[in-house]
Amino acid sequence: MDADERAWVEGLRRGDSAAFDAAFAAYRKRVYGYLVRMVRRRDVAEDLLQETFLRLAQHAKRLTADTRLGAWLFTVAHRLFVSWVRAQGVRAQLAGDLPRRMDDRSPLEALADSQAQLALERAFAELAPAYREVALLVGVEGLSPTEVAQILGHTPEAVRQRLARARAQLAGALGDHAPTRAPVARSKP
Amino acid sequence: MTTDDESQLHELSRELPAIDLDATTAERIALQARQDIGKGPPRRRWILPIIAAIVAIGYAVWGILKLIELLG
């Protein structure tokens, strides 16, 4: 946990609205990105984002000093997503939301400014929600499988298995559209 | 420890376009949430569990009294 996050948690515990604003600014884009790619609808993602931060505000004074804000917010967002899926009987709806033709762009895909980005957005969208969620939390948000396991209430091993399947399905779906950057060089300790 | 799957997903995900709220919506959400800082969950959330608990306890007490009546 970095110093900023610790300070925000301390501020939230005191009911400091500046700390809330800082946490909102730091996490809103990340949580919204996760939600919009899970529910595939901006209006619903906005509602769930609002509920996520409403709960942060309501629970502010009950946070513990060592609360990891990112994990806390993604846990709430995940639970809200699950509730939404249950409420909607959503499996059919999610399938129905997926675009069928290359020229039929969803609002989410309209953000893509290249064929590669479009293909990638679609490849993520076509993953089963359980795999997509893990791929987003690990791949996009940079959380570790252990953190994701805590958020989702699974074992780290189950998360790693989903991660491997998600990665394989993405690679299969992308084919020639897969980004061709050189692997990231890892610095030696 | 970073596995190959993690690093490949990180690599892929870099290409995803950024998604954000428009500024007006973000401000509206922040404003509404800010008003609730430290207020705790809404009380209506507790009403149903309390009613359920009262009914369950009442039923249990009634059952115990009936049992005592039968045994006595």
Image (tube, coloured by chain):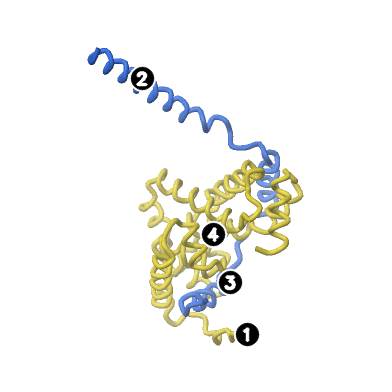
Which chain comes out yellow in the rendered image? A
Which amino acid, mark 4? Answer: Tyr
Please tell me whether mark 1 or mark 4 is closer to you in this view. 1
Residue underneath mark 4: A34
* Res B61 label: 2
In-front residue for pair A67/A90: A67
What secondary structure is marked by label 1?
loop
Which amino acid, mark 1? Answer: Pro
Q: Position of residue A169 (x, y in %)?
A: 39, 73
Which residue is painted at 50% across and 27% down in the image? B47
Furthest-left residue in this view: B70
Position of B66 with respect to A44 (left or right) is left
Mark 3 neighbour density, 10 Å: few (under 14) some (14–19) many (20 or more): few
Q: Chain B appears what colour? A: blue
In-front residue for pair A57/A150: A150
Which residue is painted at 39% across and 62% down in the image? A128
Q: Earlier in the sequence, mark 1 or mark 4?
A: 4
Which residue is painted at 71% across and 54% down in the image? A8
Please tell me whether mark 2 or mark 4 is closer to you in this view. 2
**Disc 2 and disc 4: Cα gap in Å?**
48 Å
Q: Give yes or no for contact between labels 2 and 1 (Cβ–Cβ under 8 Å).
A: no
**Disc 1 and disc 4: Cα gap in Å?**
32 Å
Q: Is residue A156 above or below residue A76?
A: below
Residue underneath mark 1: A189
Mark 1 neighbour density, 10 Å: few (under 14) some (14–19) many (20 or more): few
Quadrant where the image shows the C terminus of chain B: top left
* Res A113 label: 3
**Disc 3 and disc 4: Cα gap in Å?**
20 Å
Judge whether residue A126 can be spotted in this image.
no
Which amino acid, mark 2? Answer: Val
